[in-house]
Image: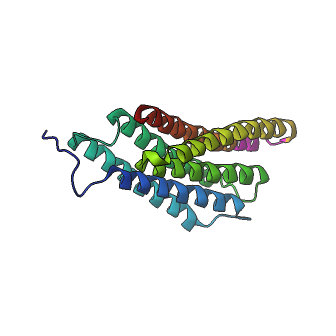
Amino acid sequence: MIFKFLPDDFNFFDLFDKQVDRAVEAAKTLKDIANTHGPIDEAIFKKIQILEHQGDEASHGVMEQLNKTFITPFDREDIHDLTKAVDDIIDTIDSLVDRIKIYKINGGDKQLIQFTALIEESVWAVAAAVRGLRSMKNARSVLESCVEVNRLENVGDALRDKVLGELFETAKDPIALIKWKEIYEDAETILDICEDVAHVVESILVKQA
């Protein structure tokens, strides 16, 4: 394989931005699903699938260029980890939406609405952190975004414990209990993955300082 230096027509940061743009849109769509009262339109499920596919394309684009390019903006391992973690956000949102569809869950659940609001906030903070990596002049604001992602993950942990405790106390239908337990846990997992992205970004900041 012949390696190149940074190609004139390629910028890693453009694809990072494309990835986080899709993640933000997926998080917004997930929140829209949670806030839908009654049955959820099939079109919104298809929208998530399209976003997941576009996120995969951006991720594959980064990996393809990583294999062709000799000089990269920061460590190759960090580029790989960052790309994978952002892609995992979109994939996990897609998996949660699939579960909602398979279980025939209607929107309007108060706890899921709370989770999806946290997820959207966290993904926005992830996007701000990733976009800020274009310049070390943004290091302070990037770090602040990472701290916010960590805070929201802690809020998500507390919310998960609260809603699962209430679920086990009040649920009368064991099947419904299993469905909602999986949905709430999947929602909190998305916040965990956002924190994974923040950790990668923080590692990049330390190495670039």
Left or right, 56 with respect to 175, comes to left
User: Could you say where residue 23 lies in the image, as x and y percent from the top left?
Assistant: 51, 53
Query: Which one is nearer the viewer's eye here, 73 or 62?
Result: 73
Q: Is residue 174 left or right of residue 52?
A: right
Instruction: State the image coordinates of residue 55 (x, y, percent, origin top left).
Output: 42, 53
The tally of labels here is: 0
Q: Residue at x 48, y 53 (%)?
A: 20
- Asked if the magenta segment contains residue 121, the reply would be no
Q: Quadrant of the C terminus?
A: top left
Residue at image position (58%, 46%) is 145
Looking at the image, residue 184 sits to the left or right of residue 13; the answer is right
Question: Residue shown at 55%/39% (left/top)?
Answer: 193
Picture quadrant where residue 17 is located: bottom left
Q: Say whether residue 130 is left or right of residue 158.
A: left
Magenta residues span 171-181
Compared with 192, 35 (above or below) is: below
Q: Residue furthest right?
A: 170
Task: State whether the magenta stretch is mostly helix, strand or loop.
Answer: helix
Looking at the rendered image, the quarter that the N terminus falls into is top left
The answer to if 174 sits in the magenta stretch is yes
Can residue 182 be seen here? The reply is no
Q: Residue 6 at x, y = what percent?
A: 23, 48
Q: Give coordinates of residue 10: x percent, y percent.
A: 27, 54
